[in-house]
Amino acid sequence: MTARIVSIGTALPETRVTQSALRDLFAAQPGFDRKAQRLVGAAFDAAAIDTRHVVLPQLAGAADDGLAVRDGDTLLMPPTGARNDEYRRTAPGLFAAASRAAIEGSGYDTEAVTHVVTVSCTGMFAPGPDYHLVRDLGLMPTVERYHLGFIGCAAAIPALRLAARIVGDDPAAIVLVACTELCSLHWQTSSHPDQIVAASVFADGAGAAIVASGDPSRGGLDLDGFATHVTDEGEKDMAWTVGDSGFEMTLTPEVPRIIGREISAIAAGVLGNTASVDAWAVHPGGRSILDRVESALGLDAAALAPSREVLRAHGNMSSATLLFILRDLLADTARVEGDRVAALAFGPGLTVEAAHLTVRRVTP
């Protein structure tokens, strides 16, 4: 029986900050010359982001007794251990909030969940988020748990693929997939172009989904198939490593160019006839990536509107972002029974992850 996403829940940190405020803060850092300040302005203004949510209230100028990241207009550079401690303090609550919303929307009881798949690349600790979900949500102590770490922005699709395979093997399984990323914890006060681009797009958020066997009494998104593809180039252009002062992102201008150059052939290979796709859920790694995908696949301007809207309102929340887009597609009354959805996400490597989904509405 086909596995189905029957509900999606999301959660955001309380602190919301405007893109312009973050731009001005970053441009004001000591040691940034006029060239660096111009680059900051150009990158932040071109990102097509209005607001972002962060777990660090100090980034919005608010007082907070958590991780100290700001002294006046100067951003501090805490060591990696302190940043990870803040992740350990704040991530479990977002995992739980998104997961509760997904479970409540599914029609299943908490006790029905049989498997948990957690996803994150912005922190690590043990016992980890999968363990905390069992305790925080009151799940059965026999729940099977899996954690996918450091796969980056593309990780929601492998997580859904794992859930689909679990359900395919055991049609009685009810799988909770939960993604939480706290990208703001790894802000780097560097004038290097890669770090400026990263600072201009990344944000914090959480998304969760309940995956179960298709049931006429529950609508959702059927998970019909998956594919993955490693490009010939890009291994050094999108990378994520642990540094002494947080995790360090490499995101070069080559990333959108590589995607734009190769996505047409990749999409045809992993999705088949793209002309038959009714809706697109493309991870908004940045506005330029969406522009390249739209152009290369010959899509009209409305095709990537859901991705652009999530980017505008929330920024790039790494792995959680795709679940926000799928949530909006599922809630869109214009999407009818049988509509075919193509999901694409891009991760370090450069890796392309893809999924075929079909909209299912409740049978009267």
Image (cartoon, rainbow, N blue to C red):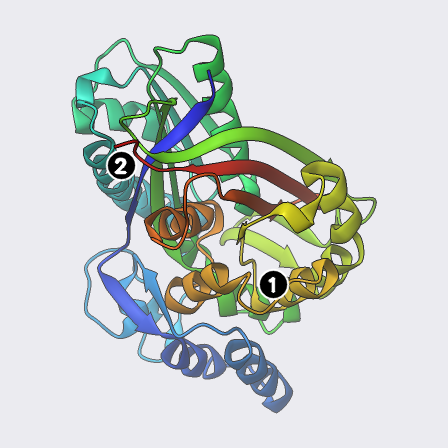
SS for callout 2: helix
Q: Please give the residue where the numbered disc 1 appears in the rendered image.
A: 290
Q: Amino acid at mark 2?
A: Ala
Using residue 101 as the reference point, say whether residue 297 is left or right of it. Answer: right
Give residue 231's position: percent from left, percent from top.
78, 44
**What residue do we see at 20% from left, 28% from top?**
107
Q: Please give the residue where the numbered disc 2 appears in the rendered image.
A: 102
**What residue do we see at 53% from left, 44% from top?**
341
- In which quadrant of the rendered view does residue 347 lie? top right
Q: Is residue 347 visible?
A: no
Give residue 169's position: percent from left, percent from top.
48, 9
Using residue 140 as the reference point, say whether residue 188 is left or right of it. Answer: right
Give residue 270's position: percent from left, percent from top.
70, 37
- Mark 1 packing: few (<14 Cα in 10 Å), some, or many (20+)? many
In the picture shown, does residue 283 fall above or below 314? above
Using residue 66 as the reference point, say whether residue 23 is left or right of it. Answer: right
Q: Is residue 259 visible?
A: yes
